[in-house]
């Protein structure tokens, strides 16, 4: 698998689709972990490109350090 791939994962018993944003290795276990963005067809929005701001992987990792989705 690579960044940009679309994958599925069971969430509350249902298959949900996600896009892989990146990877990291969990230091405590050595496990490779994927950072995912949910692809939810009910949450599609549009925005002017001028309104968008890039997010660095560093910022994404900071968001995931205390939040775990099981």
Image (spheres, rainbow, N blue to C red):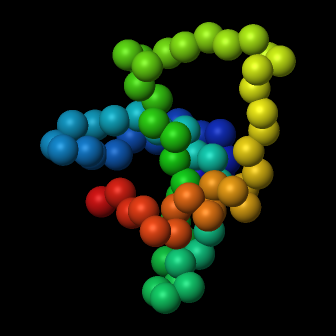
In the picture, measured across the screen, residue 70 lies left or right of residue 56, that is left
Considering depth in this image, is 8 or 64 the residue closer to the camera?
64
Q: Quadrant of residue 60?
A: bottom right
Question: Residue 52 at x, y = what percent?
Answer: 75, 26
In the picture, measured across the screen, residue 14 lies left or right of residue 16, that is left
Considering depth in this image, is 57 or 2 the residue closer to the camera?
57
Q: Is residue 59 above or below residue 11?
A: below
Q: Residue at x 79, y 17 (%)?
A: 49
In the picture, measured across the screen, residue 36 lies left or right of residue 41, that is right
Q: Residue furthest left?
A: 13
Q: Residue at x 16, y 43 (%)?
A: 13
Question: Residue 17 at x, y = what percent?
Answer: 41, 34
Q: Residue furthest right?
A: 50
Question: Residue 14 at x, y = what percent?
Answer: 21, 37
Q: Is residue 61 above or below residue 54?
A: below
Q: Residue at x 35, y 57 (%)?
A: 69
Q: Is residue 29 above or below residue 51?
A: below
Q: Residue furthest bottom?
A: 28
Question: Residue 5 at x, y = what percent?
Answer: 59, 40
Q: Which image quarter is the C terminus in?
A: bottom left
Q: Quadrant of residue 4?
A: top right
Q: Residue at x 43, y 19 (%)?
A: 43
């Amino acid at each position: 698998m690579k960044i940009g791939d679309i994958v599925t994962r069971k969430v509350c018993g249902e298959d949900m689709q996600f896009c892989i944003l990146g990877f990291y290795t969990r230091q405590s276990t050595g496990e490779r972990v994927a950072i995912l963005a949910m692809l939810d067809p009910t949450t599609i929005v549009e925005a002017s490109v001028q309104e968008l701001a890039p997010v660095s992987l560093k910022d994404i990792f900071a968001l995931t350090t205390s939040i775990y989705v099981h």
